[in-house]
Image: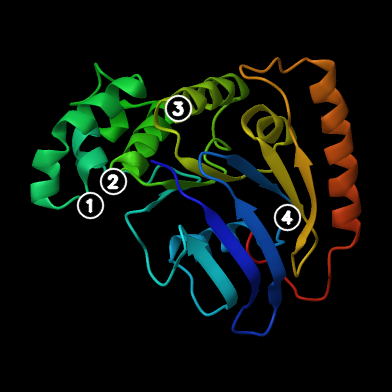
Amino acid sequence: MSSTIRIERVSKSFKAGQPVLHDLNLEIRPSEIVSLLGPSGCGKSTLLRLLSGLERDHAGRLLVDGQEIVAPSRAVGFMFQEPRLLPWLTVRDNITFGLQVRDRRQTEPLVRELIEQVQLGECADLLPRQLSGGMAQRVALARSLATQPGVLLLDEPFSAVDALTRMRLQELLLSVWQRRRFTMLLVTHDIDEALYLSDRVAVLSGRPATVREIVHVDLPRPRDRRAQEMLQQRAHLLEALRVAGSNQLTGYGTPFGV
């Protein structure tokens, strides 16, 4: 199952009056993968929190399949920068945590399938302290999909692991997406990650952020990270980010919404 995301003229300011998003518009089609790139502090993570229903108090509309987002929903999964696993629960129990008891019984086959898809079949009864960083993030991915959401939001989910593990997790994420075809919106600071995973890359301006440019990545999967087309688009995105960063508003103290 996949869903359409519509972001219509969304603006957001913090309580102290700092504007973080301004008149931001973006539409993401069912099963599409879109990455958000932009200067540090421009509000990328804030936008994800608004879409998840964890943040409110904004102007404009955020819709999933035509339904306005007013609170957290099972239709929207969220994968954070860190795994946030409960240390006293096993891998299996962390994945099912948050599901109602009756749902756990009904979704037991799904959970077994997810554990296999994230390649943790032999680790289902391990505790988080027995896992590597990459394994813990695979548990977090499976947990975010346990409610079978139509949308998966990812906030720099692989930023804390080494480069090789990061590439393997990117490949794993794509393999799960190809089976389930949910819609993905990914926040990243890594241009190579955005190009490898995405159908489109939305470059945000400096704060208050709006969509400055959308780059289409019309390359077949699996992608060759060394392909000339990837290198050309990488150079283009680097320049787009440089320009966006040079226009970053200053004077607001510590950046928000990183």
User: Quarter-wise, where is residue 112 in the image?
Assistant: top left
* Amino acid type for the residue under numbered disc 4: Ser
- Residue at point 85%, 17% (across, down): 228
Rendering coords of residue 151 (x, y %): 45, 48
Q: Which residue is mark 1?
A: 98
Label drawn at residue 49: none
Q: CA distance from mark 1 to mark 2?
A: 9 Å
Q: CA distance from mark 1 to mark 3?
A: 22 Å
Rendering coords of residue 218 (x, y %): 73, 29
* Amino acid type for the residue under numbered disc 1: Gly
Q: Which residue is mark 3?
A: 134
User: Is residue 249 or residue 171 the one in the foreground?
Assistant: 171
Query: In the shown orientation, is residue 40 left or right of residue 151?
Result: right
User: From the viewer's perspective, is the residue at label 2 or at label 4 nearer?
Assistant: 2
Q: Residues within 10 Å of mark 3 (few under 14, many from 20)?
A: some
Q: Are marks 4 and 3 in contact (CB under 8 Å)?
A: no
* Amino acid type for the residue under numbered disc 2: Thr
Considering only order in the chain, which callout, 3 or 1, is on the residue closer to the N terminus? 1
User: From the viewer's perspective, is the residue at label 1 or at label 4 nearer?
Assistant: 1
Secondary structure of the residue carrying numbered label 3? helix
User: Quarter-wise, where is residue 143 in the image?
Assistant: top left
Q: CA distance from mark 4 to mark 3?
A: 24 Å
- Residue at point 63%, 68% (across, down): 8
Considering only order in the chain, which callout, 3 or 2, is on the residue closer to the N terminus? 3
